[in-house]
Amino acid sequence: MLLEKLREQVYRANMALPAHNLVTWTSGNVSGRDPETGLIVIKPSGVLFDELTPENMAIVDLEGRIVEATHGPSTDTESHLYIYQHRSDVNGITHTHSNYATAFAAVGKPIPVCLTAIADEFGAEIPCGDYVRIGGQAIGAEILRRIGASPAILMKQHGVFTIGATVHKALQAAVMVEDVARTVWLALQVGRIETLPAAEIAANFERYQTRYGTFAASRKQE
């Protein structure tokens, strides 16, 4: 079976979406790129999550030509492909309609950096791109126009897209977006939120991205 290891990774990441309550029915998808061949593994279109298997993940090339599939690839495939075509550092993409994050997208508002958890994971506000019609490369273009250094973006009146160097990192960002969105929404019910100072955002991001967990790793080597 072609790209067996990547198929398994993409399958497991797709199955994590309903497990973390990020999707319903057949919505949402995860894809992964094989750096050696450039081929993309992506969730098939219109298939219930309970019916997904590693074997029915669709494989396409960077131009969208089907290489191997039992079902058509996700309707968001062109959006994924545009990102892969223009970001060589991205090898995993996740798309969800998770409730709290998509609530911000529904009103076209970014999620501000008002928590250290947001600074740690994202290093900046989670931006909100403009509304774009589903089904073509325009969504991918808008994502890259607005996402900046963040691994996540909200698309106005649509949902959430996250990117990563690996499938796992893209999934992690999707889980964290919903978690912080829920907390920020709850905070807004209590009162006014306050954005962290730029220096604190940078310091928290640097610590989390470069030093988090390194002490434990060094202790294991002793």
Image (cartoon, rainbow, N blue to C red):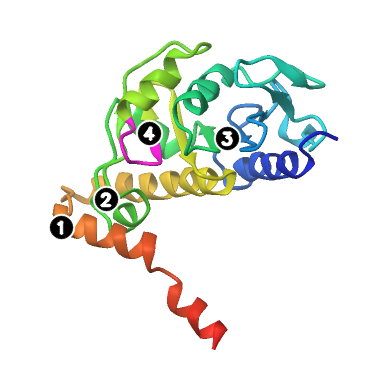
N-term mark: 2 or 1: 2
Point out the stretch of residues depicted in magenta: 147-152
Q: CA distance from mark 3 to mark 2?
A: 23 Å
Vertical placement of residue 57 versus 198, above or below: above
Q: Secondary structure at mark 1?
A: helix
Amino acid type of the residue tagged 3 in the rendering: Val
Q: CA distance from mark 4 to mark 2?
A: 21 Å
Is 151 magenta? The answer is yes
Determine which residue is flagged by label 1.
Answer: 199
Q: Secondary structure at mark 2?
A: helix
User: Which mark lies nearer to you, 4 or 1?
Assistant: 1
At 40% from the left and 41% from the top, the residue drawn is 151
Estimate the x, y position of residue 64 in percent, counting from the top left: 63, 16
Q: CA distance from mark 1 to mark 3?
A: 35 Å
Q: CA distance from mark 4 to mark 3?
A: 16 Å
Estimate the x, y position of residue 213 in percent, counting from the top left: 45, 71
Vertical placement of residue 198 versus 45, above or below: below
Amino acid type of the residue tagged 1 in the rendering: Ala
User: Which mark lies nearer to you, 2 or 1?
Assistant: 1
Q: CA distance from mark 4 to mark 1?
A: 22 Å
Q: For the view shown, which residue lies furthest in the right direction?
A: 1
Amino acid type of the residue tagged 2 in the rendering: Ala
Q: Residues within 10 Å of mark 1 (few under 14, many from 20)?
A: few
Determine which residue is flagged by label 3.
Answer: 23
Q: Residues within 10 Å of mark 4 (few under 14, many from 20)?
A: many
Task: Find residue 4 and report its image quarter.
Answer: top right
At 41% from the left and 32% from the top, the residue drawn is 102
Determine which residue is flagged by label 2.
Answer: 187
